[in-house]
Amino acid sequence: MTGGPNPLLSPIRLGDIDCQNRVVMAPMTRSRAGDGDCPTELHVEYYSQRASAGLIVTEGVQPSIDGKGYARTPGLHEPAQVRAWSRVTDAVHARGGRIVAQLMHAGRVGSHYNKRPGARTVAPSAVRADVSLWTDAAGMQPCDEPEALSLANIAAVIEDYAQAARLAREAGFDGVELHCTSGYLPMQFLASNTNRRSDGYGGSAQGRARFVVEVLEALVAAIGAGRVGFRICPGNPFNGVVDENPLETYQTLLGATRPLGCAYLHVIASPVADLDAFALARAHHPGRLIVNDGFDPQSAAAAVQAGRGDAVSFGRHYIANPDLVERIASGAPLASFNRKTLYTPGAAGYTDYPAWVPA
Ligand SMILES: Cc1cc2nc3c(=O)[nH]c(=O)nc-3n(C[C@H](O)[C@H](O)[C@H](O)COP(=O)(O)O)c2cc1C
């Protein structure tokens, strides 16, 4: 980019959410939740350090005890969690930032070692994920064999999401983002190898999209379309999902979500060689688009300039650059992060990355 103001730094309205710029902090699981799956004072510090982002999307937050997949992830289904999150949202708002909670139900990607007693591991069909995950109690463990959701269970899960959205608003969040990728529950419904249902929630692309559409409808009914976004990555194979025809699946999904008028669609570049996920999203989603994956400040500014996206989210750059917006504005160099402390408890590698100090 040469000359003219940086398009990343101009304000934008995403549904009902006024953002001071187009730099979005991408959702990142960091496994630092405390007792009762509550965020802690470290979360307050971590997110407020990054409050100059136009919008923060939190780490994945489980809407129910069944939705928890990984160790030390926070929840949004109990009063103590609401109180703890409100300290985070207050701190971000005090610095002029905006923050939405990413609702993440991990579905079959779960181990009972990471869950509370009585919690279940559920999925569209009883197809086990052939992946292992870290548990504090027993080290690396294979995923549980999931239970196939009954129709009554599906309705209950949708209500869990809606209740989490209401609690998010009670906790002061500006909205919620539905996590529909990375092989978690919504994507398990969308993808053909994990959804073997023969009822109205499986089979055709329309059937496989139905769960996501109904969750979004419930979120919109709970808190209003202007405060609901959703995140997709067509063809993402993470956690063992295989979609035989991602183009058809996501065209169908976006056709069905279009009338909802959600605040934004957050789209990650597709790993499928001939599938341009940003172009697909632009063609089938008339609202705001946040684009993601592998951007640096220059390529992000160029993407907004070219209209590929309305805003750009940064994940990894936000780990070690709490003042990413200020660095973009001043052209300061970006720091790199330590992989070893991505998911370890405590402040190291979480809140101890400094802001840039000019020499
Ligand atoms: C440590 C880490 C944790 C992540 N956790 C989540 C998550 O909870 N939800 C999600 O949608 N994406 C998650 N992601 C993916 C990021 O949001 C983002 O899509 C990815 O890092 C690519 O963007 P980048 O190139 O700007 O880093 C995670 C990524 C990283 C590095």
Image: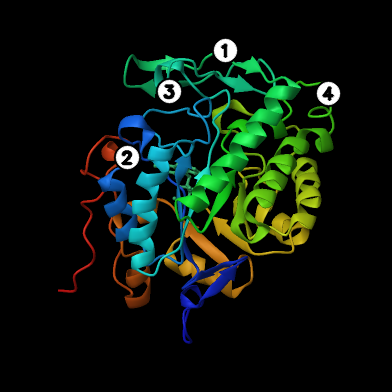
Foreground pick, 236 / 156: 156
Instruction: Say the numbered circle drawn on residue 199.
Output: 4
Q: Which mark is residue 17?
A: none
For marks 3 and 1, give the one nearer the viewer.
1
In this rendered view, identify the residue nearer to me: 233 or 85: 85
Q: Which residue is mark 2?
A: 342
- Dots 3, 1 in contact, CB < 8 A: no
At a point 66% along the width and 29% down the height, the residue shown is 156
**How many neighbours does mark 2 have within 10 angstroms: few (below 14), some (14-19), or many (20 or more)?**
some
Q: CA distance from mark 4 to mark 2?
A: 40 Å
* Amino acid at circle 1: Glu
Which residue carries the number 3 mark?
Answer: 133
Number of numbered discs overlaid on the protein picture: 4
Residue 63 image position (x, y, % from top left): 53, 36
Reading the image, the residue beneath label 1 is 145
User: How much space separates mark 3 and mark 1, taking CA atoms?
Assistant: 13 Å
Q: How is the image coloured?
A: rainbow
Q: Give the left or right position of residue 222, taking residue 332 as reference.
A: right
Mark 1 secondary-structure assignment: loop
Residue 18, above or below 24? below
Q: CA distance from mark 4 to mark 1?
A: 21 Å
